Image (cartoon, grey):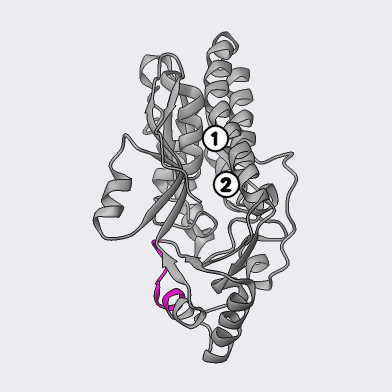
Amino acid sequence: MQRRVLAASIAAVAVAPGVFAAPAAGGKLRVAVSFNALKEFVEAVGGDKVSVSGLIPADTEPHGFTPTIATMGRLKASDLFVVNGLGMEPWAEKTASAAAPGLKVVTASRGFTPIKLTDPGEIREHGDTDPHVWLSLSGAVYEADAIRKALSALRPADAPYFNARFAAFKKPLEALAATYAARFKSAKRRVFVTSHAAFAYLCRDFGLTQLSVEDTFAEGEPTIRKLADLAKLCRREGVKTIFTEEMVSPAVARTLAKEAGATVEGIGIAVEKGFQQGGELIRSKGIQLESLAIVESMNSETGEIVFREQPQQN
């Protein structure tokens, strides 16, 4: 089905080559990205020199996305296409080649030391390696740097601007990483439970261990016996908090928390944009939201990023 949709999209773009090809206003570099995290990185580094178009809706898994006619059109009208790689967007290379043969494609994770997957369910979903590079602070910096290099190659005259904005993006994240490395070093518990094993790179950075409800039980909801086994594991490891994603049903996590004597936390975010309303909308629904860092403001002229002061957590 996905192949037929892709073929139809290619044909539609081919017969109407000028429909999507309007140039971006103000001479900005037109950058297409696969999903939202990469959009934030491109905006942070590119500032007012770029116009960014995200291809995948926020409620759609990147690896399961099916390109549409609109996808092909956005790629055809772009100067650069940024993807994560490591199996996250298996459709991307073929789609870009069909839509715009000369389009520059940047794989932001290329060269980053990958983590091999061992869980059969994760391997079926992503391939042999974990693609969730951007969910670690070091991975976010690495991918933003790849974007900086790509933008500078396309616009050498603006390289100093991109370099300055990348430096402004990198500095607080590295400081935050140093802070948390010191805190985790003395932490008594370094094990946490989540609904999706997406934090392997974050764990590698800080010496943590993640236990996943979803991946521990392969596919579907766990049986009562398997849930009891994981609850026993949580009690043994002293796990007190279970994190679950907004799009995932919390029923299993709540049952596990009850059996393990733990609590469920709604959402954890590495970097939250405090000047946007998303965080407050989530909190207004009664969901607890915790962020490692909150961006108070971003200056598109100077590249300065101001982080909100937060009370220290014990």
> Quick one: 17 or 194, which is closer to the camera?
194
> Quick one: 130 or 308, which is closer to the camera?
308
Q: Tell me where residue 225 sits by quadrant.
A: bottom right
> In the rendered structure, which amino acid carries the disc numbered 1?
Phe
> Quick one: 184 or 290, which is closer to the camera?
184
Instruction: Determine the secondary structure under disc 1.
Output: strand
Q: Which mark is residue 81?
A: 1
183, above or below 122, in the image: above
Answer whether residue 244 is visible to the viewer in this image.
yes
Quick one: label 2, few (<14), some, or many (20+) residues within 10 Å? many
Question: As drawn, which residue projects farthest toward the top?
Answer: 157
Question: As drawn, which residue projects farthest toward the bottom?
Answer: 225
Residue located at (61% from left, 25% from top): 150
106 vs 253, left or right, is right
Quick one: label 1, few (<14), some, or many (20+) residues within 10 Å? many
- Relative image position of residue 66 (x, y in whole percent): 48, 56
Contact, CB < 8 Å: mark 2 with mark 1? yes
> In the rendered structure, which amino acid carries the disc numbered 2?
Ala
- Relative image position of residue 227 (x, y in whole percent): 54, 84
304 vs 275, left or right, is right
Instruction: Determine the secondary structure under disc 2.
Output: helix
Residue highlighted by disc 2: 92
Q: Is residue 248 magenta?
A: yes
175, above or below 230, in the image: above
Which region of the structure is painted magenta? 246-254
- Relative image position of residue 52 (x, y in whole percent): 43, 31
Residue located at (56% from left, 34% from top): 173
179, above or below 235, in the image: above
Q: Is residue 311 magenta?
A: no
Answer whether residue 86 is visible to the viewer in this image.
no
Residue located at (68% from left, 66% from top): 123
